Amino acid sequence: MNDQLSRRGLLGGAALLAASAPGVSWAFERDGNRKVLVFSGNQAVPVLDPHIRYDWSTRMIQQGVYDALLKYEGDPPRIVPWLAERHEVSPNGLTYTFHLVGNAKFHNGDPVDAEAVRFSFERGLKLNAGIAWMLKDFLKPEKIVAVDPRTVTFTLERPFAPFISYVPWWYIVNPKQVMANQEGDDLGRKWMTENDAGSGPFKLRRFDANTLMHLENVPDYWKGWPMAEAARPSGIIYRIIREAAPRKAALQRREADIITNITPDDIEQLARVPGVAIENHKGSTTFGIKFNCQQGPTADINLRKAIAYAFDYDALLAITNGFAALMTSPFPASMAGHIDVPGIPRKDVDKARDFLKRSGTPNGGLELEYVHVQGLEEARRVGLVLLDSLRALDIKVNIVGQPWTTMTSRGSKPDTAPNMMSIYVTPVGTDPDTVAYQYHRASWGLYYGTAHYDNPEVSRWIDEARAETDNAKRMALYARIQTQIVADQPEIFGMVANRIWARRDYVNGFSFSPVRFTGEIDLYPLWVAG
Amino acid sequence: MSAIAEETVAAPPRRRLRLALWLLTRSFSSMLGLFLVTAIVALALLGPWIVPYPDDVQGGINLANKLQPPSFAHWLGTDEVGNDILTRVIIGARISLLVGIGITVAAAIIGVPLGILAGLAGGRLREVIMRFTDLFLSVPGLVLAIALVAALGPGIVNAMIALILVWWPGYVRLAEAKALSIRDEAYIEAARVAGASRARILRRHVLPNSISPLIVKMSMDIGQAILAVASLGFIGLGAKPPTPEWGAMISIARGYMPDWWWYAVAPGVFIYLAVLGFNLLGDGLRDILDPRSNRG
Amino acid sequence: MAGYILRRIGLAGLMLFGLVCLTFVIANVAPSDPAALAAGPDAGRSQIEQARREYGLDKPLPEQFLRYVTDLAQGNFGRSIATGRSVGTDLARYFPATLELVILAMLLGVLLGVPLGVVSALRKDGPVDHVTRIFAVSGIALPPFWFGLLLQLAFATWLGLLPTSGRISVFTEPPDPITGLLLLDNTLRGQWPLFREALSYIILPAIVLSLPCLASILRVNRSEMVEALRMDYVVAARAHGVTPWRIVMVHALKNAMLPTLAIIGLRWGWMMSSTVLVETVFDWPGIGLYAVSSAIAGDFKPVMGVTLIVGLNFMVANLIVDLLYGVLDPRLRRA
């Protein structure tokens, strides 16, 4: 009797398993007779509104759904005309005039006109979130004028050389759709969270913030498509898989066609899988360990220098399996004006000891805190490297992972900022000002200014360079800025990790641009062969 | 009350112990539990002297040697910074055991006096204590602990604080129930009439009678606390590197699945065996010391 | 009886309020600056200050608390600071996924736990009993996150039988939900291929989640059965030639019903809470995953929302069990 019972239980279990084995679907999915491409990354896309939020995954989707006046393309990045077929600048560097293409249409059929451009910039400035910081101090909403349906002018408060480098991130939304869905005076903010008012190559089909985005191709996109009509995919799915291992498995099983956020160790494995190609490109995201330059032991430049010379830079390359380049300046190599600063510290324990002797703690014997973003594996491992390196100076390291909010809040004041804090910074444009400004006195307390670095001369040079319209003079200023920052050692200049994607080899049209964020790609030119 | 239990209570201490031991040795699963617990305790005590690479838990890194499969030099392979996994899991036993015992003892120290107080005092005080306890009991422990650690910041001490905060109410319940059940027993009444002070009643009658279920619960809870700390570690809210905490190790190892699957296996097996050991032992102890409460 | 029910409901309400206070306190001991999170990574000071005003974070704490409670009373869970999305909407979206997982795990626990308990009681102290005992304790001792990883490794990666993670294929656009539970919806609609697909995604997480519950149910049924088999009338029935099968069905299961029910009630809330781990491993888009990803980002409104929802489940399940006990077993009815 008992045997009978248990056997029945077993059979039941077996039947259940057999029933649940799915017909695993190989190869890309089709929608009608066109293909759907699947891109998988780890990060959700909570808000689609281009004037509220951006991060790599969000902006990738925004770039698909929306167009801007200009667009970044290629490596090295170039700014190409998009909704604006051309633009000019007044000689005093204050007035920018954009001439729009005539045939651009929003997804609902409305034309993209100068009023839409004016409205979008005004909305971005008024909402004062996301992208607003880029232009807020230089552009007032009332100084944007729709001269005629195809011409719009921007008059800046004062000359601001980086202006053009930010314009590609200001996406144009359809004022009619936005205002029709306004609640209270929210400028359509609530509706725009999950809805599309764009003119881009894709329109939104499904939006599930934590699981997937399904973008559907706009067949008669005003700018046309770069691939043959027959090869044009029906759409792209962005699938969120939070963990590296299942994401990799999805690529191997062809449940995903492109993936990102791959650990360096996985890259080598994936490269050996037939049918998988690795996209490996020089990035622009700098990784540095910012010291607290105002309070605590690291306020002492000699200690900072000692740590910088004790640090094992080669270990950074080992951690990334060589998929990174060491920084040779505070600027990433892809940035205009970058120079290789001579004498930037590399591991030299004798020098480190010399500097330590000149510091307030000549024999070490202290403990320093190293804070990194909780859950960032690479930053955690750098912490281990730091801990290992500083043992030579008899300095202990307390490795602390904290949520981003706690880090920024601690980093906002010199007396709460940790001794050392690892920070990734991705320049938002191609202009050197975006990187240089983090060393300006005015950046104190913002996440990239947690070093509380203060060199009045450097701050003054940065201001001068911002307003300088002569490019050669500007670049000379930036060279001086870089050299001085390295001399002051407000941080350990770490590395610029490569940007890496793995794709099936039938995915074509992949185009890399270092100005995009880590993981972010341009979805527009992608197509599937065969 | 079953015959065995009566005997356990009535017999003199020496005989009671012998009987308990005899009962324990008769049960295969209890012996397995005892064996596992002894092994874990031994590893925890001897750890630093028996591990092959003691430097590997202090943050020594050896990137040239990372992610090696199990070999003669590294029985369980090496991890992502080239540390010996065997060394780290063995030292991990120390941390887990300490944390598990720490949480349980702290929870009992907070919970038991409150429970006895509630049980003996009765009235409004009892109502307040018990409602407060119910509040904590009605909160999903793990979710609350996650919220707490997220707020306090990750780290082994904060994880312990969070878990103690969600753990103590169980002991209030237990102690209160015991105190209540004893309060009305005839012999306590008699003692009170005979002029025994409250403290004396507490010491002579309430505590000894609560001790068996307490030991059983604590034994089970050490296992569960080890599991809970590992869970927080897995979510990324546990021990800080380079502390070799089992859950945190799995959390990192997970990123190296499936190609380096052995990395995740070792710490998991240790958690499993440790928790299994304490649970089996607790189970066996319950059968002997507290047979009436043999419930799920 | 009515008085008892009212009293219980009143108490549950009081505790819910206590829970609200508790979560609020926890969310505000964090030394972080939520406004910086709301304003985004590159925000300047003016954006951060604007975000602070927008989310009411510039108000004194008692006022923030009052606002939170009044909002909750109107069913408004507030907005997530990291994303600006309404927590209520997000919870409504993710809760069905968790509910489905918990229900299926519970079913597995009952369907396997009861018979295994009976079997091990019938073979008390034999090898089968020891094996099931170790199995049962293992159910509680296995770290669910680790076991989940192993199952993924075996069934998805090595055998390729089941998908690794997620709730349904990204290519499947499920029709509008009826209940939000995919298995149930597809049964109601008779869409068997979709049903099979959903089942293939849910089965591994459900197995992992069910183990502790299965273990408890097994243990209870075993001990009830052992006791039942010792009863005089069972011994008498046996002597009269009633088949053992009948004895099991009629007496033991009847006895085990109440405690099993109690365990379901107790484990219900507990499972809601431990889905956190299972959902993290399987990328299951439920409230547990939502809570963890928010907690790690330092975004407390969603964490508070999830804690309240799970706490509510805890309380309601306990209430129902208590009331059912009252109905089924009048001896236990208390004043």
Image (cartoon, coloured by chain):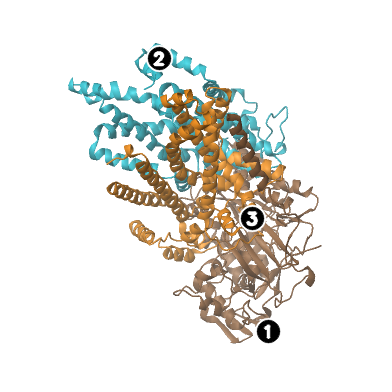
Chain colours: A brown, B cyan, C orange
Q: Position of residue A423 (x, y in %)?
A: 58, 53
Q: Secondary structure at mark 2?
A: helix
Q: Say which chain tag 2 marks.
A: B
Q: Quarter of the image containing the C terminus of chain C?
A: top left
Q: Are marks 2 and 3 in contact (CB under 8 Å)?
A: no
Mark 3 neighbour density, 10 Å: few (under 14) some (14–19) many (20 or more): few
Q: Secondary structure at mark 1?
A: loop
Q: Position of residue A80 (x, y in %)?
A: 71, 73
Is residue A140 something one can see in this rendering? no
Q: Say which chain tag 1 marks.
A: A
Q: Position of residue A462 (x, y in %)?
A: 59, 65
Q: Nearer the viewer, residue A506 or C255?
A: C255
Left or right of A181? Residue C69 is left
Query: Mark 3: which amino acid?
Result: Trp
| Mark 2 to mark 3 CA distance (whole Å) | 62 Å
Q: Nearer the viewer, residue C333 or C85?
A: C333
Q: Nearer the viewer, residue C231 or C23?
A: C231
Query: Which residue matches tag 2?
Result: B16
Q: Residue at x 29, y 26 (%)?
A: B182
Do pointers 1 and 3 mark residues of a single chain?
no
Query: Is residue A49 positioned above or below A390 on the image?
Result: below
Left or right of C109? Residue C159 is right
Query: Mark 2: which amino acid?
Result: Arg
Q: Quadrant of residue A479?
A: bottom right
Query: Is residue A195 positioned above or below C315 on the image?
Result: below
Q: Which mark is residue C192?
A: 3
Q: Quadrant of residue B245?
A: top right
